[in-house]
Each structure stands twice: as C-alpha cells, then as structure tokens.
Amino acid sequence: MKAILTIAGSDCSGGAGIQADLKTITMHGLYGMSAITALTAQNTQGITSILEVPPDFLSKQLECIFQDILPHAVKIGMVANSTLIEVIAYYLDKYRPAHIVIDPVMSATTGSSLNSTSSKEALITQLFPLASLITPNLHELQQLSFNNPIHTKSQMLECAKELSLHTGKPILAKGGHLEESASDLLYLPNGTSYWFETEKINNPNTHGTGCTLSSAIACNLALGHTLPISIQYAKDYVTGAISDGLNLGYGNGPLNHCYKIQQV
C-alpha cells in the first residue's frame, strides 16, 4: 500500500486540515500519515485560537516518519511560521519524496488569516522550490502575485502565469471564488495551460475544500496518474463531496469526505 504524508494543522471540528486530509487519503485506498504543525480551536463558524507546534517537535515527527515509512507523496497545508517551514524544507530536501503538493494556506474559508509575512517569504524561497505543484485559491494567488486583482478568468490566467514564471513550478489556481464559475486553472512553466471547468454547486458548506483537493491530488499522483489527470480526478472527488449536501454546524459546514460509502 502506498503511503501519503500530510503536513498541516489540526482542525478539531474535523472539516479541514489534518482531519480532512486523512479522510481523503483513506477514501483513495492509501495509507495516511500526518505531521502536525499547529493545533487550532475552530469550527464551522471560524477559528478562535492557534497553538503552533514547537519546531523541534515537528522535526521529531518528520524524522520518525521518513526514517520508517517513506511517503510516496507529501501534501503540505497550514504552516504558521517561517521556522516551521525551515524544518519542513530540510526534511523534504533530505529525503526527496517523489511528489510534493503545497497548498499555501494563508486564509481559511471562514476568512481567518493563517500566515504571517515572514512565513509567506519562507514559503516562496524555501518550500516552493521543492514543490511538484502549488495550489493557491484566488485570495492566495493574489497575495503571491504581488497583489494583482483577480476577478475574471483572464486575470486568473495572468496571475498564475506570473507565479509560475517566478517559481518555475506548476500552479493550480483554484477558481472557487470566481463569480461566473468554479473553474480551476493549471499553468505549467512551459506555458501550457489546462482549464478544469466546473459549474458552481448550490451548497454553502465548503469548509476544507482546499485541503481536500490538494490531498486528493497527492493521492492520485502517488497512484501514478499524470498531473492533469490527478487534478481532474481530485476535482471529481471534491465535487461529489460537496454535491452530497452534508449540513453540519451553524456556519460554513464541511464536505462529506465519505460520500462514496453507503450509509447503513
């Protein structure tokens, strides 16, 4: 069985972060492992507190994982400070897993800010050079592409191109916040682009969508699919999880990661 490692924050309400990733990995029939970067007190209504993991403890988590069960793919989500990013970059550079998907979590679906200016710079200079794919949503893409406005697909294309040229990496710009559609764009450093067209689903419960998509992509890459196919399969999975219509909590509720399992 192939193993997938998620390096991210914990969501005590189960909708995003480590919890969403492990559910997604399990639903792809793979073995999930986790290294926790932060504990969060959050639910469908927002984040109330974040407790960052000490760098030496994150280092011990990663050392235990890589020395024993080398992951076939790694997904990186919320990393709250530059020191933790340095720790992650060290182990990724040392052990060189085949696939690294980075979801540059700078804000939650609930609107809460998760990253500092220093961690943004560390992401760009230390983690992005190791990535197989970077998956910003439109708000994150705007911050990473020098705050260019993004309201249309043409602006989305220009910003994804700019970030890809700057990093030399494939960029998956997630268009869930577009007004006219929920289309995503894969832009490759060689100038090739792919649009993944999806109509908006009438469901306000989308907590953890970005975490789920990036971990599903990592799973499909580990299974041997190409990058475009991995993204399409991951989008199909997320679309099904949103379309299921799960309704939990008083705010922006989670997806149903286990929608393919028949309830009894």
Image (cartoon, rainbow, N blue to C red):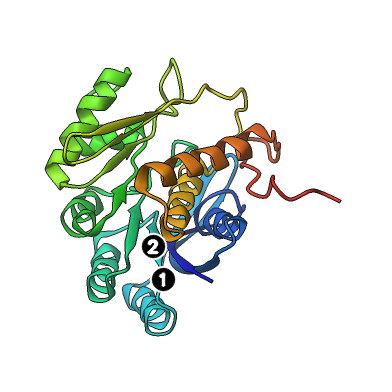
Q: On the rendered structure, is 132 left or right of 7?
A: left
Q: On the rendered structure, is 240 left or right of 116?
A: right
Q: On the rendered structure, is 9 left or right of 167?
A: right
Q: Secondary structure at mark 2?
A: strand
Whole-percent x, y for residue 150 in the image: 29, 23
Question: At 22% from the left edge and 34% from the top edge, which residue is drawn?
Answer: 192
Judging by the rendered image, the residue that carries numbered circle 2 is: 74
Judging by the rendered image, the residue that carries numbered circle 1 is: 71
In this rendering, does residue 144 appear at all? Answer: yes
Whole-percent x, y for residue 179 in the image: 43, 17
Q: Viewer-proximal residue, 242 or 224?
A: 224
**Vertical arrangement, residue 144 with respect to residue 199, above or below:** below
Q: Secondary structure at mark 1?
A: loop
**CB atoms at circles 2 and 1 under 8 Å apart?**
yes
Image quadrant assignment for residue 63? bottom left
What is the quadrant of the N terminus in the image? bottom right
Badge 1 density bin: few <14, some 14–19, many ≥20, Cα 10 Å: many
Badge 2 density bin: few <14, some 14–19, many ≥20, Cα 10 Å: many
**Vertical arrangement, residue 211 with respect to residue 68, above or below:** above
Whole-percent x, y for residue 196 in the image: 41, 30
Question: At 53% from the left edge and 22% from the top edge, which residue is drawn?
Answer: 200
Looking at the image, which residue sits at the far right? 264
Looking at the image, which residue sits at the far top? 180
Q: Viewer-proximal residue, 262 or 159?
A: 262
Q: Amino acid at mark 1?
A: Pro
Q: CA distance from mark 2 to mark 1?
A: 7 Å
Whole-percent x, y for residue 199 in the image: 52, 21
Q: Amino acid at mark 2?
A: Val
Q: Viewer-proximal residue, 140 or 194?
A: 194
